[in-house]
Image: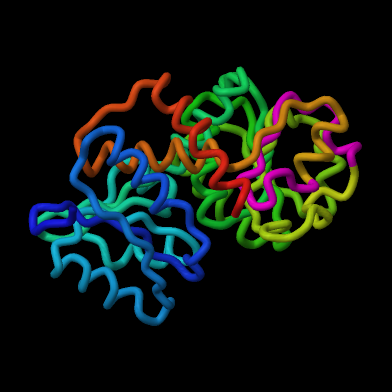
Amino acid sequence: MITARTDVLGVIGYPVEHSLSPRIHEYFARTMDQDVCYAAFRVLSGRLREAITGAHSLGIKGINVTIPHKQACLPFLSRLDETATRIGAVNTLVYEEEGYAGYNTDHIGMKRSLEAVGIEIRGKSAVIIGAGGTAHAACIMAADNGASKITIANRTSANAESLADRVKRFYDIPTTVVTLSGLNDVVHKDIVVQTTSVGLNEPPGKCPVDSERFFEGVSAALDLIYSPWETKFIQMARAKGVPAVNGFPALVFQAAASFELWQSVGFTRLYLDRAVDVLKHLAKRA
């Protein structure tokens, strides 16, 4: 039962109707016996400042931020934590008296997803496809966990160059840029993270990679899309015998990290693995 003592949480984005976050956080709250209400809020870009200041005025304890607001909301926050500063994008807002503090737990979700299939990042070369807010988190995740080299592949080189410059600002790691058409020529590519929306909510067919040949020499692939459950990217990777995981485990793991920030609870790895298994049916119906 919702009362005046219930902690109100939510997610803002556009579109946001498809979001599984309310169901995921409902599961966390129920199993951890937390008095929480979590809702999805459809926020247009032109109303973002009003949404954030209004939510703070109402005392909403925590907010997840999704496309297209992960970078756009930065000017409206009171502060950023160190990792969010490096990433240059947030996905989690935490209520403080002076305003919302910005955090990014996307990198945690990606790292734990790779660990779930037995992939260690340290010493590996990483290819990040895309240059948006999620790609920022992927690059910092790779750099922060000891990747030996990072290659950023994007349709337009300007955004990729900007992201590469951000990585170099904080890490002494070789970071290069290629266009999507140059992906097949990338030699060092142990781990590949696909962060674009290509293939989202479509029958498998569209893919940022144009040939299975790209996956030769790849040791693991992560596509952050989970609808459809198996994208063309995932199919092509598995056809080459590459362990590949979609974005659903990352979604659950990043949500758990946000929930921990808001509610001061700690989840065990066993609990999180079970949560992924329990919640999978939600994503498969999405």
> Is residue 172 at all visible to an observer of this figure?
no
Q: In which quarter of the image is residue 170?
A: top left
Residue 213 belongs to magenta span: yes
Residue found 73% across the figure and 26% down from its top: 243
Residue found 81% across the figure and 32% down from its top: 238
- How many numbered marks, from 0 up? 0
What x and y, as percent, mark residue 49? 30, 75
| Quarter that holds the C terminus | bottom right
The relative height of residue 88 versus residue 75 in the rendered view (above or below) is above
The relative height of residue 166 versus residue 31 in the rendered view (above or below) is below
Residue found 36% across the figure and 55% down from its top: 64
In front: 166, or 35? Answer: 35
What x and y, as percent, mark residue 84? 36, 47
- Residue most toward the front? 1
Q: Quadrant of residue 76?
A: bottom left
Name the image colouring.
rainbow
Q: In this view, does 227 lie to the left or right of 1?
A: right
In front: 213, or 26? Answer: 26
Per the rendered image, the range of residues in magenta is: 212-232
- Residue most toward the bottom? 46
Residue found 41% across the figure and 49% down from its top: 23
> Is residue 85 at all visible to an observer of this figure?
yes
In front: 192, or 143? Answer: 192
Residue 268 belongs to magenta span: no
What x and y, as percent, mark residue 275? 44, 32
Q: In this view, does 42 lie to the left or right of 266?
A: right
